[in-house]
Every structure is written in structure tokens, then in C-alpha cells.
Image (spheres, rainbow, N blue to C red):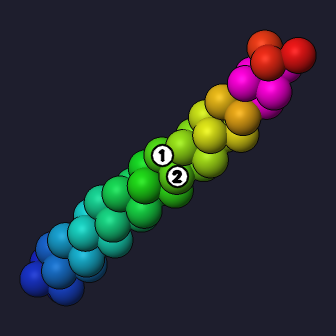
Amino acid sequence: MTNLETGLRKDMEALGNKLIIRLTLAMLGVFGVVGTILGFVLRAVLMK
């Protein structure tokens, strides 16, 4: 039973790490899109 528990812990840790990486990349992507949109909006406002 101990080997099974150890294996499951390692699998869950790896899955958690992958999830953290994916969420971080998604957040960076969202920040990039928001930054681009804000840049266009600020340019449009400041050009008037």
C-alpha cells in the first residue's frame, strides 16, 4: 500500500505542477492581451 500511495503522491504532485504552469501561462497571455488593448485605447485617447 505504501508504494501505491507514494506513486499517487508523485503523480498528483506532477499534475499540480503542470496545472500551475498552465495557469501561469494563461494569466500571462491574458495580461498580454489586456496590455495590448489598453495600449490601443490609450493611443486613441491621447491622439485626439
Is residue 23 covered in magenta? no
Q: Amino acid at mark 1?
A: Leu
**Farthest residue toward the front?**
48
User: Residue 23 appears at what percent x and percent y?
Assistant: 48, 55
Indicate whether 15 appears above or below 16.
below
Foreground pick, 11 / 23: 23
Quarter of the image with the N terminus is: bottom left
The residue sitting at 43% across, 55% down in the picture is 25
In the image, taking residue 4 as reference, residue 44 lies left or right, namely right
Horizontal placement of 32 versus 13: left or right?
Answer: right
Dots 1, 2 in contact, CB < 8 A = yes
Q: Which contiguous range is marked in magenta?
A: 41-45
Residue 29 numbered tag:
2
At label 2, the amino acid type is Gly
**Measured along the vertical axis of the image, is residue 45 above or below residue 24?**
above
Q: Which quadrant does the C terminus fall into?
A: top right
Label 2: state its secondary structure. Answer: helix
From the viewer's perspective, is 21 left or right of 1?
right
Residue 13's image quarter?
bottom left
- How far apart marks 1 and 2 lie (CA) works out to 4 Å
Residue at 66 percent of width and 30 percent of height: 39
Residue drawn at x 17%, y 80% is 7
Q: Residues within 10 Å of mark 2 (few under 14, many from 20)?
A: few
Q: How far from the left and from the top, in percent, is residue 21? A: 35, 57
Q: Does the image show residue 38?
A: no
Q: Is residue 34 visible?
A: yes
Q: Residue at point 25% right, 69% down?
A: 14
Dominant SS type (magenta):
helix
Kindly identify which numbered label has been placed on residue 44: none
Residue marked by disc 1: 28
Hey, which quadrant is residue 9 in on the image?
bottom left
Q: Is residue 38 above or below residue 30?
A: above
